Each structure stands twice: as C-alpha cells, then as structure tokens.
Image (cartoon, rainbow, N blue to C red):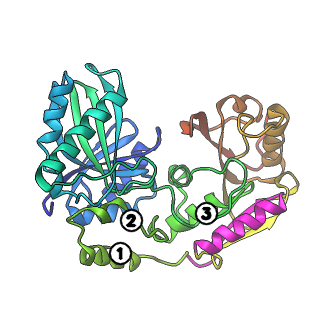
Amino acid sequence: MMNDLKLSASTFAGLEQVLSEELLQLGAKNIKIGHRNVQFEGDLGFLYKANYNLHTALRVFLQLKEFKFIKTGEQLYRAISKIDWNQIFGNDKSFRIDVSGKSEAFRNTQFIALKAKDALVDQFRKNTGKRPDVNIKNPDIRIRLHFDAWRMQVLLDSSGESLHKRGYRSATNLAPINEVLAAGIVKISGWQAQNNFLDPMCGSGTLPIEAAMLAMNIPASINREKFAFMNWKNFDSDLWKIIKKSSFNKIKDLPTGIKISGYDKAPSAVEKSIQNIKNAGLEDFIKIKQADFFKTIKPEQPVTLIFNPPYNERLTIDVQHFYKKIGDTLKHHYPDTIAWILMQKDALKWIGLRPSKKIPLYNGKIEVRMAKFEMYSGRKWT
C-alpha cells in the first residue's frame, strides 16, 4: 500500500468541482470528477492526509478490487473470496458491508451484502479458525460494494464516521447545515479572507467556523480522534503523526484586520454558536452577537454575506413574506455588498432581487440554490 493507490472521495451533488480543487491543492494525482465523488491516486500517507485535511469530502475510499460481469450469487461469492481479507484486518475486528450504485444482475442489496459477508467470514474461518463479527452500528471496518451496470468495485472506507463530523459541534439549532456543505458554499463563493465575513442568520455557527478554518488553513478533522484506517493492519502510526504535524504547521493567522462574525436573533442560537466556536478553538477569531438581520445595517468595512436562511420544509415560515424581507434588507441596508444565500429554489421568486449566479445544490435531500446577489449602491431595484 505504499505505492500509488486508487482512491475516491464522496461528497454532495454540486460540490464535486470544489472537492477536486481541494485534492489538487493537497497533491492528488490523476483526478477524475464523477457524480457525488472524485477519483484520484495517492500513497498511504496521502490517504491519511486526505482524511485529515479535506473540508468538502464525506468519506475517503480505497479501491481494493474491481470485477466485471458478476451475474450470480456464486460469482459474487468467488469474487469476494479472491481478496485476502486477513491481510487487511484481523478477526478481532468487527465489520459491515454496504452496497451502492445499480447492478444489472441484482435487485436485492441485502442479498448482495449477505453473500459477500458469507464469503468474507468463510475465508477467515478457514484460514484462522475464527470469524470476525458483523457490527451494523459501529463497525471497526467498513466495506462498500459499488455497482455500475456490470462492474463491481470493492471499496474500503478509510474514514469510518462521515468526515462532516468534525468534532466541534456539541450544540445544534434546529435543522443545522451540514459541515461539508457549509465548507463547500464558502469555497464556491470565492471568499478567501480578502474582506470581512458575516453570516447574519448563523444558527449554531457552522458557516463562520468553516469559513475560519478554510481561511486559516486549519485541517477539517483537527478535532477528530478516530478514523477507520486506524483499524487496518497496515496502519502506520509514525506516518500518521508526520502527516498531522505537517498539516498543523501549515495553519496560518487571519489577515490583519479581517473579521469573521455572525448574527442570530435567538439567544439560544447565539449560546450554541459560541459553545461550538470554543470547541473549535476559534473564539479569538469569530465573534457572534444577538441581532435581528432585518434590523441591521451594513458594517463600515467591506463584507461578504454568506447565509443559510430557514426553509419551509425544515422550519415553518411564511416563505413569501420572509424572503421578501431578506431582499428588502439587502437593498436598503447593505449597499456595495456581495451576498450569497443558500435557499429553496422556489424562494428565488419572492426575494425581489436578480441573482448574478444560481448554483444547484442539495441540502440533505432538499434541492436548493446557492444564489449570488451583488448589491451596488445607487442601483434601482425592481
């Protein structure tokens, strides 16, 4: 595993390009963009590096094998048996098998997972006299079988829990934005601490935290202690320490004078934001205050607004009235400002502003739009 490995990272639909750019900056080779994933190559150290640093990836996978024309349960059993599982993990580790994609031969994913499990445990029992246990909720080893028509990829999940679980968010408001999506929209906006950052509806503080981590080059998983690759037989603890130290040494300060801040009108949300910011160790760089965005005015210094207002699907609001107020506040109180808003696609017709960009994304299963509004002073809005 010390040579170049076939790797892939999963993400949300719409974030594939920014993930590929992150991978390129980290030093990945042979990058190929797919649907909700990016394929690339790197050595074992790069696999560690990707898990530790990537802000817009959900999981990082190692491709073990690829098989074609798997049409029957017996063929599936034999294919899984060709992999020497005892070289990857011991029979003292628990595992689970997930199935993704679409197969031309199989319609029942439970059958696929069961047949693969039988092949794996039979091999362990034959070679070691003992079989590993299946653990659905908290396995040591996660295996994914991904089907694409007649092709089956056997993938080893190196992350374990999803990488959006950074480790800093102990308190959440209703319907918090996923950390990976938050990092993705900050990157899409092009904000790189060239001016101040403001989230005027900050909820539990995820957007300001992710913005600060990106601006300061803080590894996304710096607060996280466990990854699935630590349960592999080839886990190299010394190499892991080197990767972490190298990444830590690349952290930088915010540019002088740049401020990252957030507003929320709910005292409970402000408290949760402050707690999460402390958990992330960023209390010296992010300031949160209680304020109703609709009653605020633009700060004196140039500022980029990025925010995720509530959706009617997640929280009960009068969408037409709520988004009209957002548009009116931007028009009258925030001249010469760039505002990026993640919103329900239907809400665009109520905001009363014409976006200069509209980017389709998904917040969970909700189809949304990331819209850019350029507020120029003296402009006549209709």
Mark 1 or 3, nearer chain start? 3
Neighbor class of circle 1 (other Cα within 10 Å; few <14, some 14-19, many 20+) is some
The label on residue 244 is 1
Q: CA distance from mark 2 to mark 1?
A: 7 Å
| 262 inside magenta stretch | yes
- Kind of residue indicated by mark 2: Tyr
The residue tagged 3 is 169
Mark 2 or 1, nearer chain start? 2
Residues 82 and 45: in front is 82
The quarter in which the C terminus is drawn is: top right
The residue tagged 2 is 52
| Span shown in magenta | 255-280
The extreme right residue here reads 295
1 or 3: mark nearer the eye: 3
Is residue 116 visible in the rendered image? The answer is yes
Residue 50, percent across and down?
34, 60
Q: Is residue 116 left or right of residue 217?
A: left
Q: Please report the residue visible at 58 percent of the width from the left and 76 percent of the height from the top.
A: 281
Residue 264, percent across and down?
79, 58
Query: Element under label 1?
Result: helix
